Image: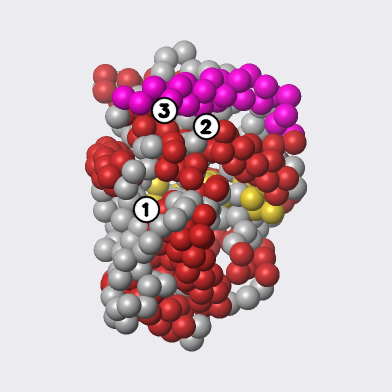
Amino acid sequence: MVFKEAMAMNAPFYKFGSFGDEVSLIIAFAIGIGFGFALERAGFGNARKLAAQFYLRDLAVLKVMFTAIITAMVGLFLLSVIGFVDLSMIYLVPTYVVPQIVGGLLLGIGFVIGGYCPGTSVVSASTGRIDGMTYVGGVVLGILIYGEVYPNIEGWSHSTGLGNVTIAGFFNISYGILVFAVVVMAVMAFIFAEIAEKKFGGVEHDTGSITNLTKKINFSRTLMAVLLALGFLSLFMGSPYSGDKATIDAKEMAMVAGGELDQINANELADRIVQGNINFMLVDLREAPEYAKYHIPTSINMELAGIDYSLLPRSESIVLYGEDGVQSAQAWFLFKAKGYPSVYMLDGGLDSWMNKVLYPSKPASEDAEALAEFAKQVEVAKFFGGKARDAGQTQEASEMILPDAPVAPAQPIQSSRKKGRREGC
């Protein structure tokens, strides 16, 4: 069975396999063009306008950022509650408290001094502004310096880690309360911004503003009322993350039982590991002593009775294997019940891996194509510390021991799939 990505009509579309890497890059490029155009049209390519927010003379940046935050927050919350967006598939940057506070302070200081954040500096440079180009040059130089000193501060940069934590999860409050609180905070920030601009920047807001009451109904106040209403509605809509229940399609179950879906064969798995094409998590479901005795390289051990789902993000593709196919089939049902969309089983389990990858048998036929395939299998077996067998020869399990460091194959083994990209910043 060809190892494939899960397909679905829900979002995030890329994670559900609606399009591939190349299309995702084209879409990202188009979105970037639109984003840069909007920033420039809003005047955010001008350092004076950006720096004016720190002097409370022009708080357009604060208004735009809060508008983006509450639009995304309310929209994602409601779309996830109705089941269109699966928030568990969206990548969360791990939290490292002290390093990220220090990084935030450095970014803020750079913003005040230079007048740009990294994104707006690129917009400025793109329009030919010398200060923007200089700022981008400084960003690149800083990245290069950080890369050089990183080995010396790697331990510190990963200190005080909290994992993939959310505000609602950390403070043990409902997501609806958080959404409503942020909407209220944003409205208060909009009102404060207009008052501050009038006092420190001498700005007289027209009838379309929030604080100018000359016109009772305008777009700004209408939008504010709609967002407050949606935020209040969020209080009663529960968690945006799907729970433990899931609907399993009976037809899909029948196809899996018949060996037609969600399986990967041992040779293909070996090919992916040899090529470094490990865009999936490989989970060994056997007991710890058996795992310690031998396991497939790159796999992690989680016994079937004690699977820790918090360590297995639903945004990842997961390959399961046990001694044979029974354990992986049981685990596959559990993962599907948890709502994991991309779960696969190693066809035949570890037994198949041993016989097809570690100790392949020489074909009885002298067919040139069969012998060429066997030659490739011999190289793969050497990589994993195994060896080829003569036709009909058997191998004792006690002899199947993985060496500490696999030997590289004499010739590269071709792979038809590109390596997965890392997420996050």
Neighbours of disc 2 within 10 Å: few (<14), some (14-19), many (20+)? some
- Residue with the mark numbered 2: 114
Magenta stretch bounds:
128-155
Toward the front, the furthest residue is 202
Q: In this rendering, would 304 be left or right of 197?
A: right
Residue 13 or residue 255, whichever sits in front = 13
- In percent of width and height, residue 232 lies at 46, 83
Q: Is residue 31 above or below residue 302?
A: above
Q: CA distance from mark 1 to mark 3?
A: 35 Å
Toward the top, the furthest residue is 410
Q: In this rendering, would 203 be left or right of 289?
A: left
Which disc, if any, is residue 152?
Answer: none
| Residue 348 in view in this figure | no
Residue 418 or residue 128, whichever sits in front = 128
**Magenta span contains residue 144:** yes
- Determine whether the residue tagged by mark 3 lies in a helix, strand or loop: helix
Which disc, if any, is residue 132?
Answer: 3
The kind of residue on which mark 2 rests is Gly
- In percent of width and height, residue 113 lies at 57, 33
- Mark 1, mark 3: which one is toward the viewer? 3
**Magenta span contains residue 59:** no
- Determine whether the residue tagged by mark 1 lies in a helix, strand or loop: loop
Residue 6 or residue 93, whichever sits in front = 93
The residue at the point 52 percent across, 32 percent down is 114
| Residue 106 in view in this figure | yes
Q: CA distance from mark 2 to mark 3?
A: 9 Å
Toward the bottom, the furthest residue is 236
Which disc, if any, is residue 15?
Answer: 1
Upstream in sequence: badge 1 or badge 2: 1
Neighbours of disc 3 within 10 Å: few (<14), some (14-19), many (20+)? many
